[in-house]
Amino acid sequence: MDSLAHHSVDDSPSDSSILVLRTARKYGTFMSQSIEKTLQQTMLFLRDENVFRSRRRDIGTLVSAFRSRMLFSDPISFIAYWGIGKKRKVGAAEKEAIAFQQEWLQRLQRLLLVPITVEFLLTDTHAKVNGIPDELANEYISSTTEFLVGYGYKSICMSEFLARGMSGRPSAI
């Protein structure tokens, strides 16, 4: 007990360690406020683009996902479905839609400051159910895949995805 009474170790933090802690706290607060401001701007952008017209209940989930991706500088991955109809080649409407999507994703990426990827599930299974001949569907799938690769997108047919038992699943699922 005497040895404890005579112990003269100064347990108080040094001025430099206090400064480091205060700086870290201020930086953390600044980063948190910056992320929240960016998220507000992003959600306004998405609202203005009418993204939430059918999924309003998922907004909180989306904000949480964006926040965590921003904090850790992780990419944001989206899955998109591409229907297979009675066409042989990608047409003007699809080209216009992808050009719009590219512009939209670039704006979103500038807001969030993290990479954004999109992978397409080509719904060949629905084409089969809808009675679209395999030859026609396969020609359209080939045209679509080539088109999407030109924009840097990945794609996989739903039948292939299901056959793999989700082992080769798109990265965002």
Image (cartoon, helix red, strand yellow):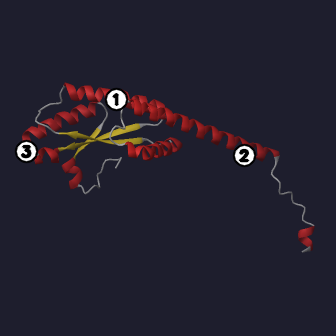
Is 144 located above or below residue 128 in the figure? Answer: above
Mark before the other along the chain sequence, 2 or 3: 2
Looking at the picture, how far across and down is residue 104, in whole percent? 37, 29
Q: Give the side of residue 148 with respect to residue 13, left or right.
A: left
Q: Amino acid at mark 1?
A: Gln
Report helix, strand or loop for mark 1.
helix
Quadrant showing the N terminus: bottom right
Read off the residue under disc 1.
102
How far apart are labels 3 and 1 at the CA level? 32 Å
Q: Which mark is residue 21?
A: 2
Q: Residues within 10 Å of mark 3 (few under 14, many from 20)?
A: few
Q: Give the side of residue 30 with respect to residue 49, left or right.
A: right
Mark toward the viewer: 2 or 3: 3
Mark toward the viewer: 3 or 1: 3
Looking at the picture, how far across and down is residue 34, in whole percent? 57, 35
Q: Amino acid at mark 3?
A: Gly
Report helix, strand or loop for mark 3.
loop
Report if the CB atoms under discs 1 and 2 are less than 8 Å apart: no
Report helix, strand or loop for mark 2.
helix
Residue located at (11% from left, 48% from top): 129
Residue located at (38% from left, 32% from top): 105
Is 135 located above or below residue 44 in the figure? Answer: below
Residue 37, by quadrant, is top right
Read off the residue under disc 3.
131
Mark before the other along the chain sequence, 3 or 1: 1
Q: Which mark is residue 145?
A: none
Of residues 85 and 160, the one nearer the viewer is 85
Q: Residues within 10 Å of mark 2 (few under 14, many from 20)?
A: few
